[in-house]
Amino acid sequence: MTGNGLKNSSISIVIPALNESEGIERTIQTIPLSMLKSMGYNVQILIVDNGSTDNTADIARRAGAEVLYEPKRGYGHAYKAGFAGASGDIIVTSDADATYPLEDIPRLVKMIDEQKIDFITTNRFKKMRKGAMSFRNKVGNAVLSATMTILFGLRIKDSQSGMWVFRRDILKNLKLTSNTPLSQELKIEACHFAGCSWKEVPIEYRHRTGKVKLGGWKVGFENLFHMYQKRLAR
């Protein structure tokens, strides 16, 4: 079912969260619920609590979200649990730290419908706010994006972006086996192996609310190794 204003069209906004008490409420509040409902969508806001030791889950519930608990920590574990718990025809993803512009959801969902696209990934670099990403992470992302182009022929400028909009029914065709590298694996699976129609769309990227959880050269090398492994032995 596509988002064409039919009453039974639905969207699941899946957001993994690990100790994000500082940013989770702000993140949820930026979701344009009234606009999406006026477009004819039922909206599920699904926070995947990835073993938080603070009150992230309680804040999320008070803000109107459904909370799914996934005790096995990790980016990929949280997202795969979220995808399994999502009920929407269309899935939208975001981090829980208020960095992604969730007010863009109506525009992106409309693009999915009107342009008959299966998968949208986002590019943070064109409209990134000054200081929103470290120089180290910019360099690492550039290396990983170039490697993705070389190995899979995908001209994606931001291989590590965590905001995606896609039709839920494509998941049955994707082989998602990774944890930390799941962001790049999802793009490779959807855009290369599954042959989905796709588009990369520029978005504004903002400063993080709360402490950084991921990053560093170790993660970068893990993602790089995963890409070569994926190319050689899917």
Image (cartoon, rainbow, N blue to C red):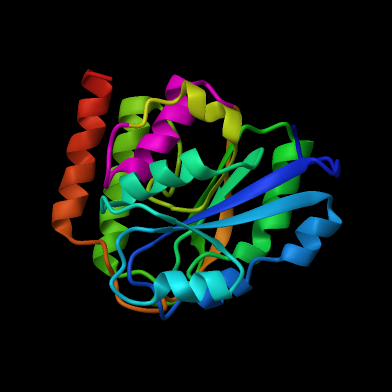
In the image, residue 224 lies at what x, y percent? 21, 41
What is the quadrant of residue 234 in the picture? top left
Residue, x 16% and y 47% (percent of image)? 221
Compared across the picture, whether 9 is left or right of 68 comes to right
What is the quadrant of residue 229 in the picture? top left
Tell which of 229 and 49 is nearer to you: 49
Q: Quadrant of the N terminus?
A: top right
In the image, residue 18 lies at what x, y percent? 33, 65
Tell which of 62 and 210 is nearer to you: 62
Can you say whether 147 is above or below 215 in the image? above
In the image, residue 148 lies at what x, y percent? 34, 35
Compared across the picture, whether 213 is left or right of 12 comes to left
Tell which of 124 and 180 is nearer to you: 180
Can you say whether 54 is above or below 4 in the image? below
Compared across the picture, whether 103 is left or right of 214 comes to right
Can you say whether 53 is above or below 78 in the image? below
Residue 87 can be seen, yes or no = yes
Residue, x 68% and y 50% (percent of image)? 108
In the image, residue 69 lies at what x, y percent? 39, 55
Residue, x 32% and y 76% (percent of image)? 54
Residue 79 belongs to the span the image colors magenta: no
* Magenta segment main secondary structure: helix
Residue, x 50% and y 43% (percent of image)? 85
Q: Which contiguous range is marked in magenta?
A: 177-196
Residue 184 belongs to the span the image colors magenta: yes
Numbered circles on residues, count = 0
Can you say whether 214 is above or below 4 in the image? below
